[in-house]
Amino acid sequence: MRRSSLLLLAAALCGLGQAQNAAQNAAVEEKPASFAGEVRNAVTGQAIERAHVVLRVYQNNGWDRYGALTDGEGRFTITNIPPGNYTLGLDRTGYVPPASLATASYQLSADQKKDNVKLKLVPVGAILGRVVDGEGAPMEGVTVQVLQAGRSQQSATTDDRGQYRIGGLAPGKYRVKAALQLLPLPPEIRTDGTAEVHYASTFYPGVAEERAARRVEVGPATDVTGIDMKMVAMPILRLSGRVSGLPEGAKNGSVQLRQGQNMVTGAQLKPDGTFEVWRPDPGKYTLQAMYSGAGEMVSSAGLEVEVGQSDVENLELRMTPPEDIGGQIAYDDEGARRPPPNPQQDSMQNGQQNGQARRVGAASPGQSAQTQVTTTQMTQSASGTRTVQQTQASQPARVMLRDAERGYVSKQETVGDDDHFTFSKVQPGRYVVQVQGYPGYVKSARLGKTEGAGGELDLSNGANGGALTVVLASTYGSLQGTVIDDKGPAAGMRVLVKDTQNRGFERQVRSGKDGTYKAGRLPPGKYRMVVMDENDNSAVLSSDPAMEDFDEAFEVGPNETVTRDVKLHPVTGKLE
C-alpha cells in the first residue's frame, strides 16, 4: 500500500512538473515580438504611403507571413510575431526595393520590440523610343523587350507610329531588343517582281547580334528617351540536315533550336528523317532532335550551331537510346568524405530551426546516411552586411547530373552507404556531375577510361555500358581583393562570381568599409567576376553573352587564394 502511495505521489509530481513546463512554454509563446519603422523614397527622402512590408519565415513545410501597410507618414507596425529568423519583403507600385534587400534578414527574440527600422524603395524608370524599317517607315506591332543577362524584364508593342514605352524598370543597365513575331516558313512565292523583306531581331542601336548591342542605363524615376532602332534586313536563312537512328514507329519527331534554356524555333521531321528550320537569326544555338517512343520522350545529344549570313546545311543528329549508368563516389582526400553515421543519435528528432544543427541517425540498409554541412552565408541586417557561419540541416548524400547546355538538374539519385548509386534512363548529352550533402566538391568524373575535370561528362554517344566514378576533393580556393572607384575604397559594392564550366556555381559578397572583399570555398576552376553597386541589377555574368566588357576572368587552383583589386571606371562602370 505504501509503495502504491509513493507511485501515485511520483506521478502527481511528474504531472505537476510537466504542467509547470507547459505553463513556462506558454508564457514564452505569449510574448511575441514586434517590428516597426518607416519606408521612404530612396531619391527624395519622402515618406511612401501604402508600401507593403512583410516578414517571412519557412516552417512546418510552409511559409508564415506577417505584414502591414505604411500610413501617410510612411510608418508601419507589425505585432504578434513569434520569435524566429525572418526574411524581409518590401513592395509598392512604381517602386522596387534596393538589391541589398534580397539578403535582408532579422532575428527576432521573444518580447523584442524592434522599432525605428529604416527602409527605402527606389522609384522605377522607363525606356521610350521608335522602331522603323529599312526605309525609315514606322513599324507597327513590333515586340520590344528590355533584357538583363539575356532575359526579358519588361516588354511593349509598337503603335501605328512605331513608338513604344516600357515602364516599371528597376535602375540598372539594359539591352533593348525589337523583334517581329514570324512563323518559321520558307519565303513567299511572288510573281510581281518583288521579294519578301525579312527583318531579323534587332538590338539597340541597330545591330543584329546581342554581343554588339549598347547598354541603356536607367536611373531612378528617369525616362530614357530616344532609344530608336532601324530594323536590320537579313536574308531568309535555312538550317537543314538529317536525324539518324530513329526506330521504326517513332512518332512526333522534331528538332528544336535553343539558346540556353529557351527554345527559339523548330520544325517537324519529315518521314525520311530530314528537316528544315527557316528564318533563324544570326547567333549561336543548340540543335536537338526528339521523338515520342514507348510512352516517353527520347532526345539526341545537342549539336552546337552558329548562324551567320548564309544557310547551314548537312547537319547530322543521331538518336541514342537512354541508358542506366551505375557509379560510385571516391575521395581524393579525407576532408571530402562525409562523416560516418552516429548510431547513438538514432533517436534524435529533427534539429532546431533557424540554422542550428540537425542530427540524424544511421541510415537503414540500402538508404543513404545524412551529413551535416557547415557553410558561410552572407546576410544583410539593419546594421550592415555580416558573414555568418552556420551549420545547415543535414542533407541526404545525393549525386546529380546537370545539363551542361540548359543548366538544370536532369537526374538526381541518393548515394548508398557503400558510396554507390545508379542513374536510370540517362539521355545522351553533355552533363556536369554535382553532389549534395558532402563537404567536398566534384574534382572529376571518370566514365570508363575517359575523365572529365570538374565533373564534366560527355554522353553525346551514350555511356556504352561504362561505370562512372565521381572523385571528390576539399581543396577549395578563394578570391579576395579591394574595390576602388574614383573617390577611393568603395564600400558596399556587390562582387558577383560565377563559374564558366557549367557547374551552376555562383557567389555574391559585398565589399567592406575599406573596400575589401573575399569570396571563399571556390571549387578550383575558371570563373568570371563583376562588381556592381546595389542599384544595378544588370549582371548574371556568364548568362549574358555581352558581359565580357564589364567583367574579369580568373582561374583558381586547389588551396589557392587569388587576389583581384578592381578599379571601377567612373562613367562606364568597366573594370580596369
Image (cartoon, rainbow, N blue to C red):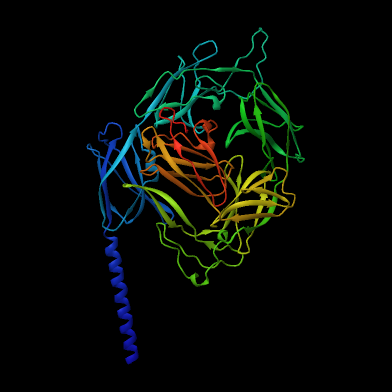
Vertical placement of residue 284 versus 386, above or below: above
Say whether residue 358 is left or right of residue 72. right
Say whether residue 22 is left or right of residue 295. left
Q: Nearer the viewer, residue 338 or 481?
A: 481
| Quadrant of image for the N terminus | bottom left
Q: Position of residue 31 (x, y in %)?
A: 26, 59
Q: Nearer the viewer, residue 382 or 453?
A: 453
Q: Residue furthest top?
A: 192
Residue 78 is at least partly visible in this image: no
Q: Nearer the viewer, residue 326 or 209?
A: 209
Task: Name the residue rendered at 26%, 36% in the picture.
Answer: 49
- Residue 84 found in image quarter: bottom left
Say whether residue 385 is left or right of residue 371. left
Q: Position of residue 417 (x, y in %)?
A: 60, 64
Task: Name the residue rendered at 68%, 21% in the picture.
Answer: 310
Q: Residue furthest left?
A: 73
Vertical placement of residue 71 versus 466, above or below: above
Q: Position of residue 379 (x, y in %)?
A: 39, 48
**Count of labels shown?**
0
Task: Name the residue rendered at 64%, 18% in the picture.
Answer: 235
Residue 337 is at least partly visible in this image: yes
Vertical placement of residue 234 versus 97, above or below: above
Q: Position of residue 548 (x, y in %)?
A: 53, 32
